[in-house]
Amino acid sequence: AGDRDARRKAMLVRATTRSARTLLSASGASRSFARQRPEALVGEAREKALATLGKGWVDGASAEEPRNEISRTFSFVSFRDAWSFMSRTASLAEKMNHHPEWKNVYSVVEVTLTTHECKGVSEKDVQMAHAMDDFARRGGDI
């Protein structure tokens, strides 16, 4: 059983690394992306970028107590699926040097994305949100 678990874990790490590379290259991001100083998306550029996100993303600017962020709650079938989603996201976050604020309770993961460097929502947040949507689809988000 231990060997099987180790092989399964190694396969997950390889798949996550491939997914992160694919998402970064498909989005046009380069290795230097993580070193670029992000700019906050404002006005029409922000509206267009947020319109590309999957269902469930909430623009914090339109909340009762506005915050310059986007957020979403992901619900999975099991804790294992939620943890797998978080592991994939964490791997990409390290590569992008862009880390989400999140909370996990059993099969639910609450995510908030904002870019502290520019005090707002940036293209990094939008790319991370797209990746999370993709990871959730593959991880069984319900």
Image (tube, rainbow, N blue to C red):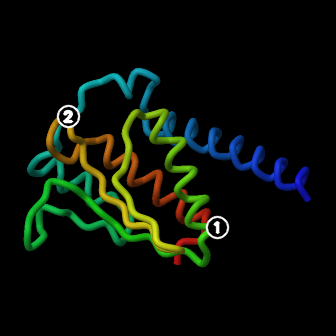
* In the displayed structure image, the side of residue 132 where residue 73 appears, left or right: left
Q: Which mark is residue 127?
A: none
Q: Position of residue 77 (x, y in %)?
A: 60, 78
64 or 39: nearer the viewer: 64
Residue 61 lies in what quarter of the image?
Answer: bottom left
Q: Is residue 97 left or right of residue 69?
A: right
Label 2, label 1: how far apart the Cα atoms are: 33 Å
Horizontal placement of 4 versus 12: left or right?
A: right
Residue located 38% across and 28% down the image: 34
> x, y percentage for residue 132?
46, 56
State yes or no: discs 2 and 1 in contact (Cβ < 8 Å).
no
Q: Amino acid at mark 2?
A: Glu
User: Which residue corresponds to mark 2?
Assistant: 117
Which residue is depicted at the point 57% across and 39% down?
Answer: 22
Examine the image and state in which quarter residue 138 appears. Answer: bottom right
Which of the two discs, 2 and 1, labels the residue nearer the N terminus? 1
**Image location (x, y in percent) of residue 37:** 24, 26
Front-most of residues 21 and 77: 77
Residue type, mark 1 in image: Arg
Residue at 69% across, 43% down: 13
Could you tell me which secondary element the residue under label 2 belongs to? Answer: loop
38 vs 100, left or right, is: left
- The residue tagged 1 is 80
Q: Nearer the viewer, residue 65 or 28?
A: 65
